[in-house]
Amino acid sequence: MNKTMTGETPESGIISNRGLVERFWAIAKPEHPVYLFSFFMMALTSMTDLARPLVLKWGLDQIEAENIAALQSAAWLFLVVVLLDYGSRSGFSYLISVSFLRTINRLRSKVFEHVIHMKMAFFDRRPVGALMTRTINDCESLAETLRAGIATILVDAVSVLVYLGVLISLDWHLSTTLLVAAPLVWLVVRWCGHRLRLKYLDVRKALAESNGWMAEGIGGVEILQLFSQESQSAGTYKTINRKYRHATITSNFYDALLYSFIEAIAGLVTAAVLIVGFNMRFGLLEISTMIVYLDVVNRLFTPIRELSNKYATIQQALAALQRIFELVETKDTIQQGEEKLQERRLDVAFDKVSFRYGSDGPLVLKNISFALKPGQVFALVGQTGSGKSTIGKLLTRAYDGYEGHVLVGGKELKQLDVHSLRGHIAVVHQDVELFPGSLRENISMFDPTIDDEKVMWAIRLVKAEHLVARLNGGLDYQVREDGGNLSSGQMQLIVFARALAHDAPIVLMDEATASVDSVTEAWIQEAIQQIFKHKTVLIVAHRLSTIAAADQILVLKSGEIIEQGTHEELQTLPGGYYAELVESSKLNKKDSSVFV
């Protein structure tokens, strides 16, 4: 719970509206034909909107001229225009909504795909809840915005331009009142719009912070309760929520200010038109023209009101888009190499490797060198923080930025294709990761080359067939999220079976037997000796029984290898650090097989 909860890094600045639209349009490329056709339907809608007052004026003129035949034609034409307007408006709304939803779905997938390819350092700086806000909430907010109003926003924007053209064509003298008001409206809209955009960015950031704190609080609820920190955590969450509330209220204020301003302008312009029209010399303005002009003025402010009402929605969508594209354009992925591993027997070598987490962090590995050949088992030993797990993280390229050389199969790690590298390494962690799905899927990891026979072979090797027999459905047994319906030992056996089933030439075990009993560990040790005897095995261990069976033991202290040799050799070193740790573990722990 000590991690920075904002989930934010310094922003690169607000992306221009044009830049956001261009990025969105690029992602929407497969839907371009549908978008273009929907824009045609939008133009047709605007034309029918324009035709309605013109047909109405023509009909009024026929009443004044007492031309019944022409009046009937005007009535039929008006009906056709109304039907066309209904059809084009419905077609546009449907097409644009479907297109937007498809684009948002592609954008959401793009965000998720980008995030899961990030370096581990990226996730170290961001809580899970904050990332979920961007991948789920921001995309969903954008989708809701587009579904709710983007279709009408586009129609309203075109309608405003069309109605302005009609008003000027009807009488340019009266239209001067609109031209006088236009600059004032533009300035107020720009002023409110800029502040709305900033406030909606604050809203999205506050929501990410709130989600981040909630995700970590719920995930660590057991620790909170054990240390009686429920009230303190709830108090912090209230403080975070106050920031969200303040940002939301401020954005609502600017939204209301803009809408009320447009209402006031609409009333003033209508009054001005009446005054100017009344003072014009008789005969210059026909009654029908005056009636139609006022009708069009009323029609003009209907979409303007709608646009002002939805302007906050537009800014909310732009704020969500900005946060999404900031994430998508974050360049924090592993540098991909081109070479692929083909061999089934691979050696591993670290040559003068130094590493630190972050550019200004302390060195956690200092000048590490060792060579591990196929058929050998190396154990990494040391107290917490000595750098054992970091070696494994560098080997799998969870982190980059090390000094020196890491070689796999004689090839520099950074020159290798990441997927090829990881496909040749089986990893078993102490922190087990199981996913919602069947037992079969959790072992095969959806690899089509691993059939049920191979899955059962791996299960038998780790002596877990009794586990499968007891589970309802066997291999089809549904594992809950994080293995919630399995014990720690059962989960560890499943992960071991996963490593065996994938039959990788390199095996990395990071304190992998910490959650199993000594009998199960003995079974696993037997499997290691039988199956891993032709593999390259690196073990981060803290059980003496695991360590003693290794071909070589690397003893780390403060990021440096200070001793290296077999268990027997290190035990006999005068004043040796390893011998001291072994003796200390025997004196201080009931189970003498448990090391540091």
Image (cartoon, rainbow, N blue to C red):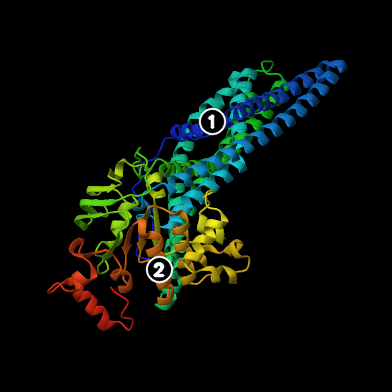
**Residue in the foreground of this view, choosing between 429 and 47:** 429
Judged by depth in the image, the label closer to the viewer, 1 or 2, is: 2
Q: Is residue 97 left or right of residue 433?
A: right
In this rendering, is residue 385 above or below 317? below
Q: Is residue 344 left or right of residue 100?
A: left
Residue that mark 1 sits on:
29
Residue 190, horizontal then vertical, whole percent: 46, 36
Q: Is residue 418 left or right of residue 379?
A: right
Is residue 485 visible in the rendered structure shown here?
no
Residue 32, horizontal then vertical, whole percent: 57, 29
Q: Quadrant of the N terminus?
A: bottom left
Query: Label 2 sits on what residue type?
Result: Glu
Question: Quick one: label 1, few (<14), some, or many (20+) residues within 10 Å?
Answer: few
Which numbered disc flags the more N-terminal residue, 1 or 2? Answer: 1
In this rendering, is residue 59 above or below 118? above
Give the spatial CA distance, label 1 vs label 2: 56 Å
Q: Quadrant of the C terminus?
A: bottom left
The residue lying at 42 percent from left, 70 percent from top is 233
